[in-house]
Amino acid sequence: TLWFNTGLAQSGLDTSAYINKFDNVSLRVNYKTPTNKFSKNSDVYFSVKILDGLNSYLAGFEKRDPSLDNRLYIEAKCMYRNNSNDLTYLLYPKEWQLKKQNNTLTVGFEHLYNYKKGKGDIDFKLRSATLTQDYDYSFASLSAVNKNDLGKININTRTYIQYGLGSKWASESSLFAAGANPEEMMDNKYTRSQGFFPTDWATFGAGVNNFHAGGGLNLRGYSGYLLPELDANGNTRITYKGTSGAAINVELEFQELVKIKNKFLKNNFKLATYLFGDAGIINYNLSTEKLLLSEPRIDAGLGAALTIQRWGILQTVNPLTIRFDVPFFLNRIPNVETDYVAFRWVIGVSRAF
């Protein structure tokens, strides 16, 4: 894919000095091919992106067993931003550093399985910074997603655990408590840059905000909140991002209680309505200290996700899911709030599970 950028209709930039500073050309190349002659049920793939201010290069190899339910993969990735113009694209410009190579090597194993009235997906990965002096970090993570069909009620669960080490973490690759980190957001066309969401929704502050990207610990009720935590000396540490943590996310879908008979709506749109609850902990220790985990944070509420499945003549457009979540309950409220049960809302695209 090749873009030629005109710079028309720019908005939301910090100063007028940046108004004409953008990449004239953007590029994305994805390639994948089977390598069955080398090893049956295997593939090699690579990706090159010079897009929204990010230079990103990825190469990988994956191997599946005969059942296709188990996948072993290895990936090498490099990310680099050259100058301040590259930051003006972003919803979270302060979470990226310039002229630093974020090179990583990832080895992972994924297992798909089915059981009575449900299916699951377990993904375990080891990742480490490599071939760079700019960063020093590594982590192991485990994600387990289960979808249970109980007739007119569906229960979906997600468990996520991560343990990280290192003295120099890339902020864009850190573990974010509320949702996806900036690196993950670059893989989504709706969150990789400004334009679809107001930038004011994507700031961190003393209270919760209104933008959410599914991922991380997925504590959606704490989106945009700095998550202060007191250490043993009474000093405040900010924990909206960290290196280690764990979370459980649950959604109870009930949209099938009401049947949609209109054929057009049924074939082109899908509406999921659900009750949700998220609970998680994240570390707040310095790299020189032993692991310190925050007190659990919990949110719960009501949500809806509208998926546009078909786009008329634009047949190759992938489905788009727009979420509206209302986390009525927080067990640890910001100082700027007084009620544990209150009306709060977040909007995002896609779902974490």
Image (tube, rainbow, N blue to C red):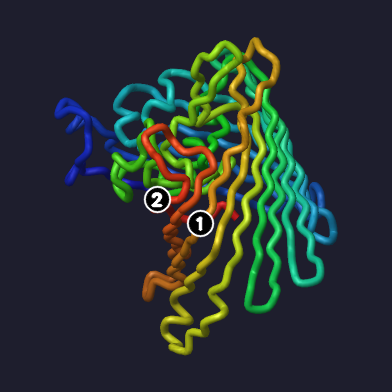
Which of 36/154 is in front? 154
List the residue tagged with mark 1. 301
Which residue: 37% across, 34% down? 336
Residue type of the residue flagged with mark 1: Gly
143 is higher (above) or lower (below) than 173: below
Q: Element under label 1?
A: strand
Find residue 288 and report its image quarter.
top right
Circles 2 and 1: CB distance less than 8 Å?
A: yes
Is 226 left or right of 102, judged from the image as shown? left
Would you name the residue on which mark 2 appears? 344
Residue closest to the eye, 254 or 201: 254
Q: Earlier in the sequence, mark 2 or mark 1?
A: 1
Which of the pair 125/236 is nearer the observer?
Answer: 236
Report x, y in % for residue 307: 46, 67
Q: Residues within 10 Å of mark 1 (few under 14, many from 20)?
A: many
Measure the alpha-carbon separation of dots 2 and 1.
Answer: 9 Å
x then y, percent, for residue 154: 64, 69
Answer with the quarter of the image where residue 198 lies. Answer: top left
Q: Residues within 10 Å of mark 2 (few under 14, many from 20)?
A: some
Q: Residue furthest right?
A: 66
